[in-house]
Each structure stands twice: as structure tokens, then as C-alpha cells.
Amino acid sequence: MIPAAFDYVRAGSADEAISLISQHGDDAKFLAGGHSLLPLMKLRLAQPTVLVDIGRVTDLSYINDAGDHVAIGALTRHMDVENSDVLREHAPLLAHAASHVGDPQVRHRGTIGGSIAHADPASDMPATTLALGATYVVQGANGSREIPAGDFYLGFLTSSLAPDEMLTEIRVPKMNGARWSFQKFTRRAQDWATVGVAAWSGNSGSGVGLVNMASVPVLATSVSNALAGGASIDEAAEQANAETDPQSDINASVDYRKHLAKVLVKRALTEAAG
Amino acid sequence: MEISVTVNGVTHTGDVEPRTLLVQYIREHVGLTGTNIGCDTSSCGACSLHLNGEAVKSCTILAVQADGQEVTTIEGMASADGTLHPMQQAFQDNHGLQCGYCTPGMVMAATSLLKENPDPTEQDVRIGLEGNLCRCTGYHNIVQSVLAAAGGAQ
């Protein structure tokens, strides 16, 4: 399968990338690792007329301890997130979740920023960073702004990024020793999650992100509220679907997804409490 | 667009359409057909090769993204005198292939895996090869081959 024809330009910096995307208009797309965009282009579900390749903007590949949070460059590959000592110490849930993205070959190319900007509710990085209360830094022609993960996802594959804005950094609050769990239910080893759960629990409360349970990644605030109100894990897990609106597809019906969400939230909270 | 890609140590320079996939470039422009196209959707791993020393799926990379980079394919694994790479030898010794279609991708993924984890457990190998499908379902001997190659490398 070959994508429809397009023009290709390569950016050397974030500024140049934003300038190029502004010049080329709405039909231009950023190309990072390409592991979300190229499959869509091969199926001709996406037909951008211009690709702005940001894959060589190497100064956006970094993981830095920034005091109360960890700053991750948008072009950091999943493999580097997975193996980062800084993340394993301060945000181990994110490092672990990254190790479940696709397979090793995919993780050698795919980037955390690409995955988040793609805004696929079935991907692991959006729901995990949402559960952790991350902030996304985006840059446009008029400077940069910060978007809380909770305000970023608007609909299926749709985010609050403007067409000429580029995601540049993901800021993940340090977990400060909070316990965590990542549960991913798949039919085949490398698949997207049929349902996934990224959860943490600590002195400052808890966060539960749900993968593939609506048109956007879901923050299960009712579960966290139940826990904060003194509910048991079993009682809290019963609230797993308060914010969900899943779809039926070839892998699972709506009812099965809702059942899985409860089971996996319970497993996640139990592991995090253990 | 003109690109230069070093494939198995030899630099190839030529014009490609931007939409040319890396696997297509390697097979049709460079003329090395050891890298197979299986699912063409980055699921099966048959098209795995090394880009700058790491296993990647060449059906999901544009040739222009490999401009200026180093590619190693299955043809680049054996020595010039024909001596097989230890991983290839291990696959032969352990009957790690049946029809052979997945084998180039398996060998490329397995060598990349051992580079990152030189002493894997059987479980590490199975997880490390999750991106490669064997339609003959010959996984047992593939895993044994990789473990044998890991043991031999020590």
C-alpha cells in the first residue's frame, strides 16, 4: 500500500517547522516517527499534500528532571521513555506504559509527542499522561502556551492543537513514591488495548486513566472521588464507567468493554495498593 | 527528491518519490529482495531491518526519512566470505525456520534484541519478538535459536 502523493520538506528546528506548516496551510501535517500518520496515509484515510518532517529536530528529544516534574521533549521515542532512569525514578508508571506501546520496532521510531498529538483514545500515552496530570507545551507562530492534558483531547483523533501549532514538551508531575499499576488487555501481544488502565495512588490522591473507553482518553474521576471518600477498592471500581462512552468494534462490544474497565480498574487499584 | 542511503556499507544515491516506502526502496531501487513485505501494516515484522543499528519496520518508514542514514538488511548479516552471522547460524542449527518467509525479519529483530539485552530469558525473547509473526507458528524453535545465539555470544 502506497500513500497518495505529497510534497516533503524537512525542518531543522521547531521554529522552522512551525514556519513551514504555516506556509503550507491546512493540508500540511507534521511527520515525527510516522507510526500513527503513515499507516493512515497508506490506507488513504489521511492524504496530506505536504509533510513537514520534524524527525531530525533532535533538540526536542530529551528527558530532564525539572524539580517538581519531568520534562520530556515531544520527539523522545517510546524506547527512550521506557529506558529513562529519570522516569523510572520519578514517573515509573509512564516509563512502564511506554514499554507496552506496540512492539520494539515501533518503539524505536514512534515518539511520545506524536502519540499524544495524534490523540487516539486507544493509545497508551494519552491516557497515561492524563492520569498523571501532565501538562503539554505547544509552540505556534505567536509563542508557546501550556495545555493541561485534561483540556487537550476534544474528540476522536482531535485535540486543541491549532493547525499551525506543534507539541514541543510533555511535563509530567513527579509521582513522589505513589504506587501505580498499568493494565492492558489485548487480543494479540502487540495490539492496541481493547481496554487499558493507567492508575496511581499516593498521599496526594489518585489518578485513573482509561484507554479505549470513549472517543477521547478518559480520566475516571468518579473512581478517584470514591477512593477519596473512603470507598473500598471494590466499591471504587464499580464507578469505572461513570465517565466512559465506549464503542463496539470487532474486538469487543460496549458491554464487554464496560465489564473489562471495571475488572481492570479493580486489578490496577489492588496492585497499586499492594 | 535525491537521497543517499548507506545499505550494508554501500552508499546508494538516487531520486525517489517522497511517498516511496523504505521497504520498496530497498527491494526495488537497491535491488535487495531479502527484506520481505508481509502484512504491509506494521503488524507482522517481515520487513524488519536495521536503521542505524536498531530494528525497525521498513513498511512504515519513508525512504526519504532514511536519507543520510545507515541501513542493514539480511543480506548484510553474513561475512563477505559467506560465513553466516551467529544468529543466522543459530536459526539453521535449531531449525528456527519452516517456510522461511518471516526469517529475515526475525533475524533482524533478534539481533537488535540481543544488542539491547545480551542475556535474555526465554520470556524476554518472546516479548522482544512480539512484533514478528511466524505464520507457520514455529515460535518454539525461533525462541530456542535466539537463546542459543545469546549463549554463543557470551
Image (tube, coloured by chain):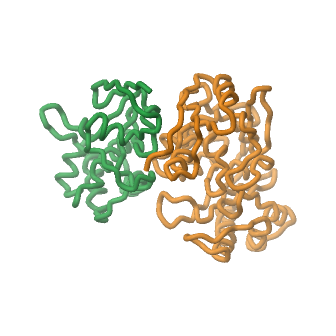
Chain colours: A orange, B green
Name which residue lies at 36% across and 56% down.
B122
Q: Quadrant of residue A14?
A: top right
> Is B7 situated left or right of A201 in this image?
left
Name which residue lies at 26% across and 46% down.
B149
Observer able to see residue A216: yes
Q: Quadrant of residue B86?
A: top left
Name which residue lies at 74% across and 34% down.
A138
Q: Nearer the viewer, residue A201 or A127?
A: A127
Q: Residue A56: where, in percent of width, then height?
A: 54, 27
Q: Residue A179: where, in percent of width, then height?
A: 69, 54
Q: Quadrant of residue A250?
A: bottom right
Q: Is residue A228 above or below residue B48?
A: below
Observer able to see residue A105: no
Q: Is residue A12 above or below residue A221?
A: above
Quarter holding the C terminus of chain A is bottom right
Name which residue lies at 69% across and 71% down.
A262
Q: Is residue A264 above or below residue A128?
A: below
Q: Nearer the viewer, residue A219 or A228?
A: A219
> Is A189 situated left or right of B46 in this image?
right
The residue sitting at the bottom extreme is: A255
The residue sitting at the right extreme is: A229
Q: Residue A98: where, in percent of width, then height?
A: 57, 48
> Is A81 situated left or right of A222 in this image?
left
Q: Residue B78: where, in percent of width, then height?
A: 20, 37
